[in-house]
Amino acid sequence: MGFFRGMLNLDRRIIFILIAGAVVVPLFIPFHLKMHPTPASQGLYNAVEKLPEGSTVIISGEYDPGTAPEIQPMMIGALKHCFRKGIKVILMGLWPQGPALEGQALQEVFKEKEFKEMNLQYGKDYVNLGYKAGGAVVIQSMGTSIPATFPTDMAGTPIEKLPLMKGIRNFNDITFVLDFSAGDPGTPAWVMFAHDRFHVPMAAGCTAVSAPMLYPYLQTKQLSGLLGGLKGAADYEWLTKSSGTGIRYMPSQSIAHLVIVIFIIIGNIAFFVVRKGEKR
Amino acid sequence: MRREIPLFITAITGVVFIIAYFIPHPPFNQIQDLFQTWFQIIAAFAIILGVLNLMVVNGDKVYRRSKGWGYSVIIILSFLVMAGIGTFKLGSKASPLEEGTPFMYLFYNVYYPLTSTVFALLAFFVASASFRAFRARNKEAALLLTAAFFVMLGRVPIGDYLTSWIPLKWLHLSTIANWIMAYPNMAAQRAIMIGIALGIISTSLRLILGIERSYLGGD
């Protein structure tokens, strides 16, 4: 009984140490885990895969450094997938930190020999329009005129000087939208306006905690696919046959989840044993 | 007039946006475009308001030497350094947002790791809270606990390794987790979404019709 009472009042620092170990040890002793992509992840991959060469895709980043470990691998995966398929990419963000992180994702992509050799050019193959305040109203405004909403790119270059933006008036000239979001404004705003109002097909990636909230959009086909958390990112890397932090960090997340589940089981056993003892 | 004018602006804006959503043709779409531009300008000014609020609240804390005033000094200094380098384009030729500028250096090497570190602490608190809170005290809690068990293990590859020996695929943890997410979770989330939407519609109507006036301030 004393042991189980002790378990119920376990010092939380012990939990902290075990979680730290579960996260850190697999980073130094990596092991390979086979991915089984979820239907939601497969949906996003299939949607991008079906896009024809030369399509123009908007990739919007609504996340910050705190959520970047989950979202950034998705962003990198999406950029690689689009560039391999010869898709033109327009980057933007409804969070101030989003476009800077997208810039970092581009740097990561261009570190790889395959993409360096593609000799992709800024302004022609991809652009970064930067951040615009206003949330959902920005998306609504883009439905009327993208050049009016974003008169310059992130670095202040007028967008009429960017060859990729020539002929881009509004969502009628956009083939697909990929939204990577960690909160509000984010995917619900894109679904409500870009998809429902202006009928642009889209898919999304989000943090694991916000994924359950977006499942209704999957069933109604408002979202073609959804990457949920680091597992979603790892699924995408697996499907696109790329290496990245999604797959690399998956052992840490797996062991951490296992440790938490073991703690929950032990906590419940202790709870029932103590309650039974008290009833006697 | 101090109350009537804001009520009038709210009512007109609300009605125009509703009509323009269903009838995207002149003159409604043109008025909507105009309002959208105004909104973006106001949203940009809201950032300035936020900055002023940050400075006033933290400046007051420092002035009064309130508890934790040292943190406020750090906030003010950090803000001034980032805003100064960004506004005056220190060390950058065209835009401070270009790669390799001092602004981006600070973003990647100071702001990025600090924010990541704070967010990463969540993992420890979530683990500790799960251990204490996930107890099967009643039927509802047991149901939640069971769903959490399947989703937590089924959403990571290790769940498949634990159950891959079972010949029936629908008993694999990942299959069960996908089913929980796609059906019970989706149904519950849809119910919540419908509830929120109905709440937004009723609140919006109260605002447009001038019944809800708390946003004007006062009693």
Image: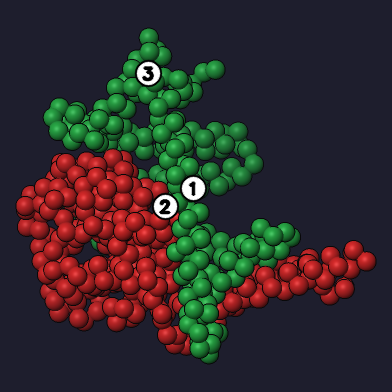
Chain colours: A red, B green
Query: Which element type, helix, strand or loop, lies under badge 1?
Result: helix
Please rate how many residues cluster around mark 2, counting C-alpha atoms within 10 Å: few if below 14, some from 14 to 19, many from 20. some
Query: Could you tell me if residue A35 is visible in this image?
Result: yes
Residue located 52% across and 38% down the image = B58
Please rate how many residues cluster around mark 1, counting C-alpha atoms within 10 Å: few if below 14, some from 14 to 19, many from 20. few
* Chain at tag 1: B
Q: Which amino acid does label 1 sit on?
A: Ile
Viewer-side residue, B187 vs A203: B187
**Label 3, label 1: how many angstroms apart (C-alpha)?**
30 Å
**Label 1, label 2: how many angstroms apart (C-alpha)?**
17 Å
Of circles 1 and 2, which is in front? Answer: 1
Q: Which amino acid does label 3 sit on?
A: Leu
Quadrant where the N terminus of chain B sits is top left
Quadrant where the C terminus of chain B sits is top right
Viewer-side residue, B152 vs A112: B152
Is A71 placed above or below A249 here? above
**Same-subunit check for callouts 1 and 2:** no
Residue located 55% across and 84% down the image = B162
Query: Which element type, helix, strand or loop, lies under badge 3?
Result: helix
* Chain at tag 2: A
Pinpoint residue A162: horizontal percent, then vertical percent.
9, 55
Pinpoint residue B17: horizontal percent, then vertical percent.
27, 31
- Are the residues flagged by discs 2 and 3 in contact, CB closer than 8 Å? no
Residue bearing the label numbered 1: B192
